Image (tube, rainbow, N blue to C red):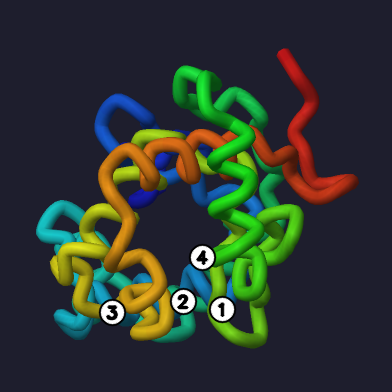
């Protein structure tokens, strides 16, 4: 119930408020992000009160992550304008796919999040924060890779990633 206010009942998030879609995300990624916010390694003042040790035990964090991981991934996420998808695919293949996977599926063992079907606005905002050094828990390799990216480059990559479909068998039924 704590997460639903921002991330919605189905964990689809809110594009307009930059709350990520978390349904189907890897347990390891969810736990890492919650623990990083809790410990101050990732700044998120809105989320911190809901995951503090006074509210959630470490066991609760794991249980919440497992629950969210098992939710079907909505395909109603926001997308960009679709005008430069070829460039987005090129940049993604060149610099992102090695960690996030060819299909945006991520890598749970290495804490690389699933980016397929994520909200465009969230992907863009987080990429800017990572590039500009504002997201302190970012992977140093990613920081180095996207340091040279312009906002326009980050937008086309975010648009491309937002359009990648969820892994087979994980998509929520269209309503």
Residue 13 versus residue 144 in the image, above or below: above
Calculate the distance from the C-alpha at mark 4 to the C-alpha at mark 1.
Answer: 12 Å
Of discs 4 and 1, which sits in the foreground?
Answer: 1
Quarter holding residue 108 = bottom right
Q: Secondary structure at mark 1?
A: helix
Judge the density around disc 3: few (<14), some (14-19), many (≥20) Cα neighbours within 10 Å. some
User: Which residue lies most toward the right here?
Assistant: 169
Residue under label 4: 64
Q: Position of residue 99 (x, y in %)?
A: 61, 74
Q: Which residue is mark 2?
A: 31
Question: Mark 1 touching mark 2, by CB under 8 A?
Answer: yes
Residue 28: numbered disc: 1
Front-lying residue, 78 or 1 = 78
Extreme residue in the top direction: 175
Circles 2 and 4, Cβ within 8 Å, touching? The answer is no
Image location (x, y in percent) of residue 62: 52, 77
For mark 2, give the secondary structure: helix
């Amino acid at each position: 119930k704590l997460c639903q206010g921002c991330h919605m009942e189905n964990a689809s998030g809110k594009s307009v408020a930059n709350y990520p879609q978390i349904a189907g995300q890897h347990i390891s990624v969810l736990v890492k992000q919650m623990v990083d916010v809790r410990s101050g390694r990732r700044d998120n003042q809105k989320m911190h009160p809901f995951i503090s040790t006074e509210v959630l035990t470490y066991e609760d964090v794991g249980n919440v992550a497992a629950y969210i991981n098992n939710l079907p991934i909505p395909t109603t996420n926001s997308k960009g304008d679709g005008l430069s998808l070829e460039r987005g695919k090129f940049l993604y293949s060149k610099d992102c796919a090695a960690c996030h996977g060819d299909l945006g599926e991520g890598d749970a063992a290495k804490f690389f999040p699933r980016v397929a079907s994520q909200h465009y606005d969230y992907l863009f905002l987080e990429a800017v924060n990572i590039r500009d050094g504002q997201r302190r828990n970012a992977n140093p390799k990613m920081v180095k890779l996207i340091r040279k990216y312009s906002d326009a480059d980050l937008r086309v990559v975010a648009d491309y990633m937002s359009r990648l479909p969820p892994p087979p068998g994980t998509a929520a039924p269209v309503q």
